[in-house]
Image (cartoon, rainbow, N blue to C red):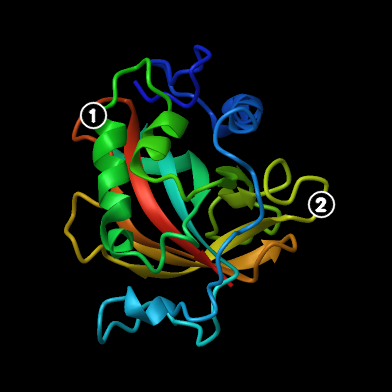
Amino acid sequence: MARFTSYSVTMTPEITTASSLIPFLLAASTLALPTVPVACSLSSAQISTVLPYGQTNLTAPSAAPEFIGLGVGVQNYTCNTTSSTYVLFGAVAELFDLSCVFSEPSFASVQEKAFSAWTAAPDSVDVFAVISDLTSNSAVLGQHYYVNNPAPSPGASATTPKFDFTANVEKGNSNAFVVAAKVGDLAAPTGKTDVDWVQLKEIQGGLASQVFRTNTHGGQPPTSGSTSRGIIGSGYWAF
């Protein structure tokens, strides 16, 4: 079971939609880690330092990022009975600020450690407690979940990712979100057990024009079952 709060909010054996969990995520995040503005400068941060050398699937901006975050949560899948394959239809994750961790040696392994701790944690432990045990230099940035695609086109996914900071570091700013679509995809260099690294482009919102998911750990569905949740820990860079 995946624990998002300590208030009996769990992923049930039945598939759970992202929208049904959002109110609980927002409430819990205001009670756990501090929700302060990004605390440390990222002026020297370059995403090219974490992307595999020589890859061309993701286009690295030369500018410094607006934020670097750690996402911890689950990916939701359903089974396509025609093809007998899993199809991603959403995700729910909390996003934590890594600006003050970026310059530390622990930055290189923080996603892996968060994934391992989140996977091993008992049901009574929520994601905020897991992150607090890993680092004291992190605040809640916001939430990541999926919404209906506001700009559907032939062949495009019906749902698309959203990054929402309106209840946390940008509380009171109704435009502090970004709904984005995938424009680049790179197989995780760590292997098939980890979901792809992706580049996303803004469709709506004022939070960022681009978001990158990197340093993924987990997130893949199992090999059997009609519905599934894949636990994931990832890095997110926004520009």
Measured as percent of width and height from the top left, residue 110 is found at 31, 53
| Residue at 35% over, 32% down | 229
Residue 140 placement: quadrant = top right
**10 Å crowding of disc 1: few (<14), some (14-19), many (20+):** few
Report the front residue among 51 and 171.
Answer: 171
Q: Which mark is residue 173?
A: 2
Residue 106 is at least partly visible in this image: yes
Label whose residue precedes the other's in the sequence (1 or 2): 1
Image height of 209 relative to 114, above or below: below
The numbered mark at residue 44 is none
Task: Measuring from the top left, give residue 36's x and y in whole percent.
Answer: 65, 49
- Is residue 162 toward the left or the right of residue 49 in the image? right
Task: Give the spatial CA distance, label 1 vs label 2.
Answer: 36 Å
Q: What is the secondary structure assignment of the residue under circle 2?
A: loop
Amino acid type, mark 1: Ala
Tell me which corner region of the image, top left, top right, bottom left or bottom right, holds residue 208: bottom right
Q: Quadrant of the N terminus?
A: top left
Q: Residues within 10 Å of mark 2 (few under 14, many from 20)?
A: some
Residue tagged by mark 1?
120
Identify the element where label 1 is drawn: helix
Q: Quadrant of the image for the C terminus?
A: bottom right
Residue 82 visible: no
Side (left or right) of 6 relative to 13:
right
Q: Residue at position x 56%, y 71% from top?
A: 41
Q: What percent of the width, then of the height, locates residue 104?
A: 35, 64
Q: Is residue 130 above or below residue 146?
A: above
